Image (tube, rainbow, N blue to C red):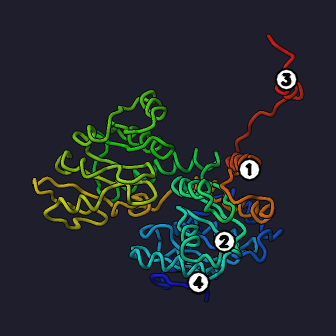
Amino acid sequence: MAKHDIKDIGLAKKGKLRIEWAAQEMPVLRSITERFSKEKPLKGMKVVACLHVTTETASLMETLKAGGADIALCASNPLSTQDDVAASLVKHSGISVFSIKGEDTKTYYQHIKDALALKPQITMDDGADVVSTLHKDATHLLKGVIGGTEETTTGVIRLKAMAKDGALRYPIVAVNDAYTKHLFDNRYGTGQSTMDGIIRSTNRLIAGSVFVVAGYGWCGRGLAMRAKGMGARVIVTEVDPLKALEATMDGFELMPIREASRIGDIFCTATGDIKVISKNCFPLMKDGAIVCNTGHFNVEIDIESLAAMSKARRIIRDYVEEFTLRSGRRIYLLGEGRLINLAAAEGHPSAVMDMSFANQALCAEFMVKNAKKLEKKVYSVPEKIDNEIARLKLKAMALTIDTLTPEQKKYLQSWEMGT
């Protein structure tokens, strides 16, 4: 059996069935798996993946293995692991997994180190924790790494900062920046799965509530769209004037976070930054206000300050912690401030992760073919890969589009013709 540290291998049967269910909605990844099985583009490659251990991730792992890779998987968030999936990957797929839902911070980083014992040639990150660990605590392994990929906005921000400072020691492809990733995964995946996590954990009615979305990037856009669709009065807070203007023209109210703090019923951060909901916000909130996060790390909410200004705290239901302020007002924190869509729900639906993980698989192949040509910086997903994934997705959905005629192609490539 593959090396592992998981909750219970006995959960493998349940996990296998759930993986099969999710895979039915992942036809693009399935077609890549079929090709990888024949061509073995990752043969001999050691891949360390630090991703949310979900049913969809399991399909990606099986695609990489079909391509010839040797894999070690660890979680990219302490609360995002689906323990039955981890068990199935170990027992039925022979993949090393180091991940337990609810693991503490020490165990989380130990699992990253356990995965790095594979001595990776390719890293696959969701938040850049493997890259960070390699550069800080395992520099002796860097010489063997040819490149990596990054799944999420927060990770790309961190990696671009490293590249700017000259600290990045190998090339990374920013999978998050592919159109077939962020336009769909971040918007439609985050929008639906975040609402799912909030509703599962609270069972509160969204219709008629005042729903505050902090940040109007692609994740914030998707969340605001879904909250509005469920009947909420949606308020957006922003620091970027262009995004703020867009939110206004999309029909949402716009105001500073402190102003919104006085009237919001449910708050959700989606920024990738620190202390977005700060200690100055909590005393202004209504009794019973609900606070959660759908950005990658739990730093978006100043939980430490919330705890310091509370006279009591308790777990009142699964994934809901009640903080009673000295004023007697209660604030409810969901999922320890971590990704609520994965902490309390199952993450993005497989149909949208199909495209995201197709990008991961094809970018791993791209890295193997091109690593020697690439500099130590962050690259966008090649347009050819993005377009191919979109083409495959349309084909799987039995949708067709028009093609340009020779005359139309010539017109677009010329400048002589006018009105």
- Disc ID at residue 382: 1
Task: Name the residue nearer the viewer: 220 or 107.
Answer: 107
Distance of label 3 from label 1 (alpha carbons): 25 Å
Crowding at label 4, few (<14), some or many (≥20) Cα neighbours within 10 Å? many
Question: Is residue 242 left or right of 417 when viewed as pictured?
Answer: left
Q: Which of marks 3 and 1 is nearer the N terminus?
A: 1
Question: Is residue 313 left or right of 319 when viewed as pictured?
Answer: left
Q: Mark 2 points at which residue?
A: 62
- Disc ID at residue 40: none
Q: Which of marks 4 and 1 is nearer the N terminus?
A: 4
Distance of label 2 from label 4 (alpha carbons): 13 Å
Q: Position of residue 297 (x, y in %)?
A: 43, 60
Crowding at label 3, few (<14), some or many (≥20) Cα neighbours within 10 Å? few
Tell me, yes or no, whether the two marked residues, 3 and 2, touch with CB atoms within 8 Å.
no
Question: Is residue 318 left or right of 114 when viewed as pictured?
Answer: left
For badge 1, the amino acid type reads Pro
Q: Name the residue under label 4.
A: 91
